[in-house]
């Protein structure tokens, strides 16, 4: 550990004092430039430096984060903050960038990709490259084809192929996975019709179905995925217009649809003439996936994917692959909604996926999710959690006598946010007593471990209750 200490002055710019955290970050940069700090040097612990400079620990945290964003340093969980080798293209490749939370809460309620500074850096780089390319700037300023330009669609199709997803039919560029769901419902259903999904499924589908004034029916779900026999019994009474499935990682339970049931679903769709909407946004690597429904029944399947879980949720760029017969209907729906997906965002996504760091970020994320899953499943093993080895979600059944709403409230009071099953219930299906934990959401492995400790404490203390009764 170095004994380096920055010298802070009363620097001003336009008569306004420069914030202390920025002065400290700039001092780090200057010390690296002059050689006072060299590659691999460890910066002083935050509290120690705060005492030396007579500032708050929060100021030092912001300064180190600023230096991290600029690529000067990298943080190693449980070890400290170190100066990067500026001559190495992978200096900060696999360091974690904390996301600040003002109230100190560890949020495991939302299914986010694990944080990494490359997400911001890559987007900044592609935007800068676009800005320096006058021809591209001129292109993205113009109206474009409703389903996307040919070169954008080719780039996205090549990306899907590299991820081992089937490429078939017509590819349409969407504003993310949720937009893809909405488009499917718009072109395949009319108000009042019946649609089916797992009894526990992605809330975005249920919400879109309600807004489309559709009747939803939940199909029983077990450890092998959707109960296709139950779906067949439904078809004998009333055939749904479509069946929505997430066969590789059910959200929230993490269950996968078996190969046998995938084949049965494809055969049932052909026999009863309903559509299959396959949502692959909750990404898992190809080695962990089964056969795509788009491969088993390409003439009956619409396939949804998005950049949100691999690159950035803020891009709002996704793909919807459909049988060619639906291409004109989709184009009409897109024109009625927004005419086209913003071409600037699509160009940004296409440049990002073409960069070498896109694959490096993908590989890091898979490794990181595996570590987090194994940690969470090991710590909570007594409660029999369920999740894919490299999946983003963990399904935690609660012990006998514990209510999801009660445990949720206790965890919230203790500073950990989780998801209860109610939003995932399709139709009028009852909610089980369980919780969904998103292992990718916490800022770091350390934050995840703290959250798991709190969850264990709450589950092991059966004598507490957040409720007051009269």
Image (tube, grey):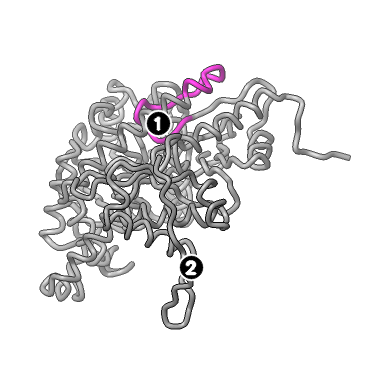
Q: Position of residue 177 (x, y in %)?
A: 34, 50
Q: Position of residue 378 (x, y in %)?
A: 48, 20
Binning the other alpha carbons within 10 Å of mark 1 as few (below 14), some (14 to 19) or many (20 upward) gives: few
Q: Position of residue 159 (x, y in %)?
A: 17, 46
Picture quarter with the C terminus: top right
Q: Nearer the viewer, residue 378 or 254?
A: 378
Q: State the SS at label 2.
A: loop
Q: Indicate which disc, 2 or 1, sits on the residue closer to the N terminus.
A: 2
Q: Position of residue 449 (x, y in %)?
A: 51, 31
The mark tally for this picture is: 2
Residue 19: assigned label: 2
The residues colored magenta run 377-394
- Name the residue at the right extreme: 470
Q: 208 above or below 19? A: above
Q: Quadrant of residue 190?
A: bottom left
Q: Disc 2 vs disc 1: which is toward the camera?
A: 2
- Name the residue at the bottom extreme: 15
Q: Residue at x 17, y 57 (%)?
A: 351
Binning the other alpha carbons within 10 Å of mark 2 as few (below 14), some (14 to 19) or many (20 upward) gives: few
Q: Residue at x 76, y 25 (%)?
A: 463
Q: Is residue 426 magenta?
A: no
Q: State the SS at label 1.
A: helix
- Name the residue at the top extreme: 382
Picture quarter with the N terminus: top left
Q: Nearer the viewer, residue 204 or 137?
A: 137
Q: Is residue 323 left or right of residue 43?
A: left
Q: 349 above or below 129? A: above
Residue picked out by circle 1? 236
Q: Nearer the viewer, residue 26 or 438?
A: 26
Q: Residue at x 42, y 35 (%)?
A: 79
């Amino acid at each position: 550990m170095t004994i380096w200490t920055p010298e802070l002055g009363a620097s001003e710019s336009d008569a306004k004092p420069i914030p202390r955290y920025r002065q400290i970050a700039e001092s780090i940069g200057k010390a690296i430039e002059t050689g006072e700090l060299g590659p691999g040097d460890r910066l002083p612990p935050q509290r120690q430096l705060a005492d030396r400079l007579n500032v708050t620990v929060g100021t030092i945290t912001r300064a180190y984060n600023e230096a991290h964003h600029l690529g000067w340093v990298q943080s190693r969980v449980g070890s400290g903050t170190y100066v990067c080798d500026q001559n190495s293209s992978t200096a900060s490749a696999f360091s974690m960038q904390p996301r600040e939370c003002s109230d100190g809460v560890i949020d495991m309620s939302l299914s986010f990709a694990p944080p990494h500074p490359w997400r911001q850096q890559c987007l900044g780089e592609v935007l800068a490259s676009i800005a320096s390319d006058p021809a591209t700037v001129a292109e993205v300023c113009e109206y474009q084809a409703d389903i996307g330009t040919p070169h954008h669609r080719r780039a996205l199709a090549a990306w899907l192929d590299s991820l081992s997803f089937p490429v078939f039919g017509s590819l349409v560029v969407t504003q993310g996975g949720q937009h893809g769901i909405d488009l499917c419902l718009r072109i395949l259903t009319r108000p009042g019709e019946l649609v089916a999904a797992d009894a526990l499924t992605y809330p975005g589908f249920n919400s879109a179905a309600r807004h489309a004034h559709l009747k939803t029916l939940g199909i029983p779900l077990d450890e092998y995925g959707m109960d296709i026999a139950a779906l067949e019994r439904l078809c004998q009474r009333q055939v749904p217009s479509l069946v929505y499935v997430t066969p590789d990682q059910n959200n929230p339970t993490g269950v996968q649809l078996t190969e046998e049931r995938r084949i049965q679903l494809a055969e049932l769709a052909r026999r009863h003439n309903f559509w299959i909407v396959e949502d692959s946004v909750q990404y898992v690597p190809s080695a962990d996936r089964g056969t795509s429904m788009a491969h088993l029944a390409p003439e009956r399947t619409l396939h949804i994917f998005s950049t949100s879980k691999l690159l950035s949720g803020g891009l709002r760029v996704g793909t919807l692959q459909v049988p060619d017969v639906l291409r004109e209907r989709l184009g009409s729906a897109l024109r009625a909604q927004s005419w086209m997906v913003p071409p600037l965002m699509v160009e940004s996504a296409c440049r990002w996926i073409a960069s070498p760091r896109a694959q490096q970020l993908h590989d890091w994320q898979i490794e990181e999710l595996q570590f987090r899953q194994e940690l969470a499943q090991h710590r909570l093993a007594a409660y029999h959690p369920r999740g894919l080895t490299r999946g983003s979600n963990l399904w935690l059944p609660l012990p006998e006598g514990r209510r999801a709403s009660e445990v949720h409230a206790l965890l919230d009071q203790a500073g950990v946010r989780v998801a209860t099953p109610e939003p995932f219930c399709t139709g009028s299906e009852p909610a089980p007593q369980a919780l969904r934990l998103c292992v990718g959401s916490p800022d770091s492995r350390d934050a995840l471990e703290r959250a798991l400790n709190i969850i264990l404490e709450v589950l092991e203390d059966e004598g507490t209750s957040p409720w007051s009764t009269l």
